[in-house]
Every structure is written in structure tokens, then in C-alpha cells.
Amino acid sequence: MSENSLKQKAARGVVWTAIQKYSTMLIQFFSGMILARLLSPSDFGCIGMLVIFMSMAQVFIDAGFDSALIQKKNPTSVDYATVFYFNLGASIILYVLLFFCAPLIADFYKIPILCKILRVQGLVLIIYSLNLIQRNRLRKTLQFNVLAKITIVTSILSLIVTASLAYLGWGVWALVAQYYMTAIIPCIFFYIISDWRPTLEYSWASFRSLFGFGAFMLLSNLFGTFCNKISSLLVGRWFAASTLGYFSRAVGTEDMASMSISGVVLETTYPLYASVQDDKERMANIVKQAVTLLAYITVPLLLTLIVLAKPIFILVYSEKWLPCVPYFQLLCLGGMATCLQAVNTQPIAAIGKSKIMFKWSVLKQSTGVLIQFSLLLLYGMKGLLMGIVISTWLSYIVNISLVSKYIGYKYYRQLLDITPIFLVAGLSALAGYFGGVVMNLGFYLNAVIQLLIILLIYGGWSLIFKPAPFVYGISVLHSLKRK
């Protein structure tokens, strides 16, 4: 594949993924506004307590086969059928396991209703397993326009149903219904649009071949998911359901800001890495462009959100959610590292180093959990949040070291590439914060002034000095315009 062709495919993928992510983010924004006013923090807390179990079950169902199929250059119909039946069988087994473990989980949190919620919510896993292959095939062939349209329609219909049920007084069950909508609607569309259907064949040779790569991806993702979601389990066990509700809302808002941006890049880069896996120089160049572009957009955004957190939460969610603000501000500091470490994970997987990834994931994630738990014991909720920030930056340091060793994009080079972005974004945020304090023109007017100061300084730097990610972004837009 030529460099121009690769850039055009990447550009189209970025644009359609951006349409998907930002449309979804806008819908989630309105969803958050509506549901935060109709439901209580305890309702969100109950769902948050079950996140770790649902997330780990989804990782088991996927079992690393999604990455294995994309990494494999020419998967066959037998490969797809084998993975489909494995996904389906795994989802049924895991639902049965969750069904019988539900009373124990409810006793652990000392909230009896969680037993019923988990038994109903767990059925979503079977629906989820039915559309994994169709989604994988669309990603592998870079058909992000189809994925974008399905995701947008799903988000709109899900919001309508969930908000209606919340208004009618369904409480936490409205959030359970939301899980069903986000699983059923894509499943229907995938089977209407896609011409792929599972054939009546299963190959143990195919399973072993794919699982040889996917096994370590499974272990890595499983361990990573557990460590990432352990904070919700700790908060749910140590604090009231309402505290977990505040924490979940802060996490969801930070994710909406950071991961919706990085998701645009991450969704499109892994298939690209896989397509040039034998050319380390091209891979290193893609990593550099992805990392600097992500930092260029994400760092100033998250720093701006830290400055404007209080007015944003009051405006969007109402004053009853103000306890979220300090949680959210600390999580934004970790969100910068989360985006950057994620984009440094993909190239290692694309060249087949899943075993290496697993070993390092165990080391960095277990260390991160130990840090979080220790700081929780010492400083309570604030300590846990600081532990999350420290562990995400630790993961980033480990990941850039692996990229430096196996891809050739040296860790010191990457740090030098993103340092100017952090410096200018940090100075812009500080100027915006103190500018608002000095002006003191009122709560919301101060926020507007702070935002304008940040935009003027960061935008002025971009236009005058033309940093590399700014130039690259413009070139991608020009490429799309010519296409």
C-alpha cells in the first residue's frame, strides 16, 4: 500500500470515526444532562458496582480474537465462524456464572437489589457476542462510515428510551434498559447490512492459531480491565452508593472528553499498524503522528476542563452533582496519560508481541493497584484518585519504553515531541485561570473569559509557530478535500 493511499484511508477513517465519536459525545452530553436530573447518584452507583463484572465478562467473550483477526493478514470464513461460535458459547457460560454468583455479589456490597439487576443485565452479554464478527470485519476493511452511522442511530434511540423510562420512574432499571438498547440495536443493523453469516463449521486448528496470539491479548486485556475497574469496586465496598455515583459520573465525564478524542485515533490506527507491520519505519512514523496529534488536542482540552470544572458540572448536571468536581479534576490529570499510553499499546500488538504486552501489563497494572489501594488506606477517596493518576502515568512510561525497543520510536524522542505541547497548554490554562480570578466578573462570565484566554494563547501559538501535529492535521484535511 502506497504512502498516499495509506494517508487517504487513514484520513477517511479518522473523519468517519470523528463523526461517530463526536456525534455520540454530543448525544451522551444531552443524555447526561437529562438522566442526572431524573435519577439519583445512588442509581448510577448501583450500576457502577457491577461495571467490573460486566467488563471482565466482555473481555472473556472477546478472548483477544478481535485483535487476532485484525492482525491476521487474510482470515478465512472458517476463522470467522470459529470465533463466532466461541464468542457465543463463552457468553452463555459467563451469564450462567454471573446468574449464580449474583447473590454473593449483592452480599459483598450489602445491597440486595444488585442480585436482580445483575441477573437481568447479564443477558446483554449474549446479545453482545452476536455482533462481534460483523463489527470486526467492518473495522478490518476500514468501513468506519458504516460503524459511525450505526453508532449514532443507536445512541439516539437509546437516549430516547432511557430518558422516557427514567421520567416514568423506573430508576436504576432505566439504566439497565440502556444496556439492552446499546446491544440490541447494533445487532439488528449489523445483520441487516452485513452479508456475513456464520457457517456450520468449526476448526480447532483455526482456534489454536488465533488463540496463540489472542491468548496473551486476553490475559493482558483481562488483567488491565480488572485493574482499571478495581477502583469502582473499592469505592462501592468502602463508601456509600451515592459516593460511587459521584465517582462514576466524574469518570464518565472525563472519559467522554478524553477517550472520545483518542478513540478517533485508536479506532483507525490499529488496522493501519497491522497493514504495515513488516515496515517498522512506517509504523514509527504513524506512532509519532498519532501521539503528537493526540497530545496536541487532548492536553489543552483536559487542562481547560480542569479550570472550568465547577461551572460545567453546575450547568450540565445541576448543583446536586458538585461533589464530582474534585474527582473529575484529578481524573483529567490521569486522562492525558491514558490517551497517550493507549496509542503506544497498539503497535506492539500489531507486530505480534502479545506475550510481551501481557508480561508488562501484569507488572504495571499490579503496581498501579497496589499504589491505589495504599493511598486509599492512607488518604481515603482523594488518595484513591491520586493513585489512579500515578498508575496511568506509570503505564505510559512502560508503554513508550516498549515502543522504543520494538518499533524504534525512541522514548526520549517521544517525550521531546510532546513537551512543547504540555508547556504551552499548561501556560494557557494557568493564564486562563488567573485571568478569570483577576477579572472577577461573575461565575459564568468568568468561565467564558477563562476559555477565551486559553483559546487565544494556544491558538496563537499554533498559528504562529505551526507545531508538527498542527501541520499534520491540516495536511490530513487537505488530503480529504482533494479526495
Image (spheres, helix red, strand yellow):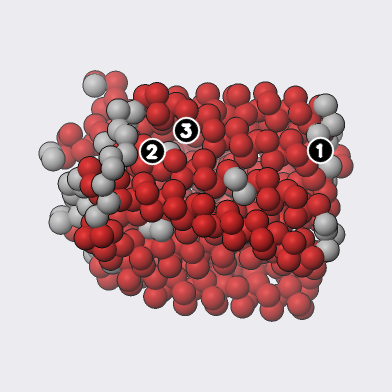
The answer to whether residue 287 is left or right of residue 461 is: left
Q: How far is mark 2 from mark 1, CA to CA?
A: 31 Å
| Residue at numbered disc 1 | 171
- Relative to 147, residue 248 above or below: below
The answer to whether residue 33 is left or right of residue 267 is: right
Residue 138 tag number: none
**Label whose residue precedes the other's in the sequence (2 or 3):** 2
- Relative to 479, residue 212 above or below: below
Which of discs 3 and 1 lies nearer the camera? The answer is 3
**Label whose residue precedes the other's in the sequence (3 or 1):** 1
Residue 236 in view (yes/no)? no
| Image location (x, y in percent) of residue 399 | 40, 66
The answer to whether residue 70 is left or right of residue 130 is: left
| Residue at numbered disc 2 | 135
- Relative to 237, residue 74 above or below: above
Residue 187 tag number: 3
Residue 83 in view (yes/no)? yes
| Callout 3 touching callout 1 (CB < 8 Å) | no
Q: Residue at x 60, y 32 (%)?
A: 181
Which of discs 2 and 3 lies nearer the camera? The answer is 3
Q: How far is mark 2 from mark 3, CA to CA?
A: 9 Å
Would you call the spot at circle 2 few (<14 residues within 10 Å), some (14-19), or many (20 or more)? some
